[in-house]
Amino acid sequence: MRVDLFDFHLPPENIALRPVRPRDASRMLVVRGVGAFEDKGVRDLPQLLRRGDVLVLNDTRVIPAQLEGTRGEARIGATLHKRIDLRRWQAFIRNAKRLKEGDTIAFAAGVSATAEQRHDDGSFTLCFAGDEPVEVLLERAGRMPLPPYIAQKRALDEADKVDYQTVFAAHDGAVAAPTASLHFTPELLAALDEAGITRHTLTLHVGAGTFLPVKADDTASHVMHAEWGRIDADTATALNDARAAGGRIIAAGTTALRLLESAADEAGVIHPFEGDTAIFITPGYKFRAVDGLMTNFHLPKSTLFMLVSALMGRERMQAAYAHAIAGGYRFYSYGDSSLLLP
């Protein structure tokens, strides 16, 4: 499909630079397969779902994956994208024309890495020096990887260390937050429990590729970056049992949805999964594992707007986004939410 079919105009004032406080005070636009759009709030989620439904959350934890350093006189920026092994990460590089294979980048706090290999997409494999775990080095020298559309408008500060992390983050490895889950609070989770809506977690370490624009003119020419994820056997069994009993599987975020769809077979049975996924969901895709999606509002011409268009229909989502823009909904990572129920 033509990528320009997924374009829309977003006024800059609709882009959220800070989250609302408390987290669950965000607005939420409910989009069903038919009928009028419903202007609700995230706190309405327990009433909008049904007893027996299952909410699936991504428990990845964002690491301080952005680094600033030098190679000689050249300033080099690195955003880690995907772990390769204990000492190596694939990274997107700013000022990459000043870096070649074999060069050493000196980052802050005595942290350094060698640029081992340049990849076809312009990223590099970085090998970090020393014996300390890379996560320890990042805590010393790195900073939280705010999305470009926020970082270009304001500086990172201490508040982002908390704001850009979910309350149930457990497993280090993401370089972008699963932003739909930023809305959850202990109070909202307790209300969901009271309403009989169960929760299960999976882990998908979101990569920096989630921010990359689609440069191809046609979706068939776009290559997704792989991300590592895991669904354990107990979780897969619980989700299949819930669906067999008539419950709906509601993914909290496109990351959870993509991993669930990667783990499901043609019959819709979810299997244990551990490994990379590069699934690219566009209109025409037949969903197997999920019955609904809670998600924030996405970039024009992005793979994520293509995904929600696949779930609800492109014209339906164009109309929903027009409604949201006109209604002053806040977009992107720190923005408001939507609940999509096809």
Image (cartoon, grey):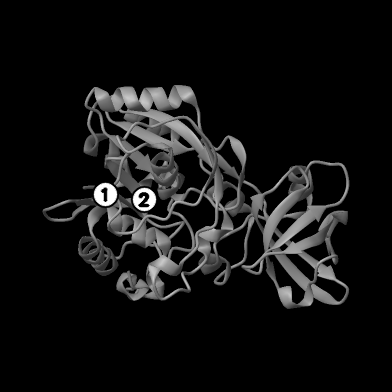
Say which amino acid is labelled 2.
Answer: Thr
| Residue position for label 2 | 295
Task: Tell me residue 202's x, y (percent).
Answer: 48, 35
Position in image of residue 330 (x %, y %)? 37, 62
Q: Compared to 30, does 73 lie above or below?
A: below
Give the spatial CA distance, label 2 vs label 1.
8 Å
Q: Position of residue 248 (x, y in %)?
A: 26, 33
Q: Name the residue rendered at 39%, 67% in the picture.
A: 219
* Image-based side of 183 in relation to 77, left or right: left
Where is residue 125, by image quadrant? Answer: bottom right
Say whether residue 12 is visible.
yes
Q: Label 1 is placed on what type of residue?
A: Leu
* Image quadrant occupied by the N terminus: bottom left
- Vertical placement of 49 versus 286: above or below? above
Residue 208 located left or right of residue 258: right
Q: Residue furthest front?
A: 266
Residue 35: image x %, image y %?
11, 53
Q: Is residue 330 visible?
A: no
Above or below, 200 against 339 in this view is above
- In the image, is 166 to the left or to the right of 287? right
- Relative to the observer, which residue lies in front, 305 or 124? 124
Element type at marker 1?
strand
Q: Earlier in the sequence, mark 2 or mark 1?
A: 2
Disc 2 + disc 1, Cβ < 8 Å:
yes
Q: Residues within 10 Å of mark 2 (few under 14, many from 20)?
A: many
Q: Closer to the camera, 145 or 81?
A: 81
User: How packed is label 1: few (under 14 Cα within 10 Å), some, or many (20 or more)?
Assistant: many
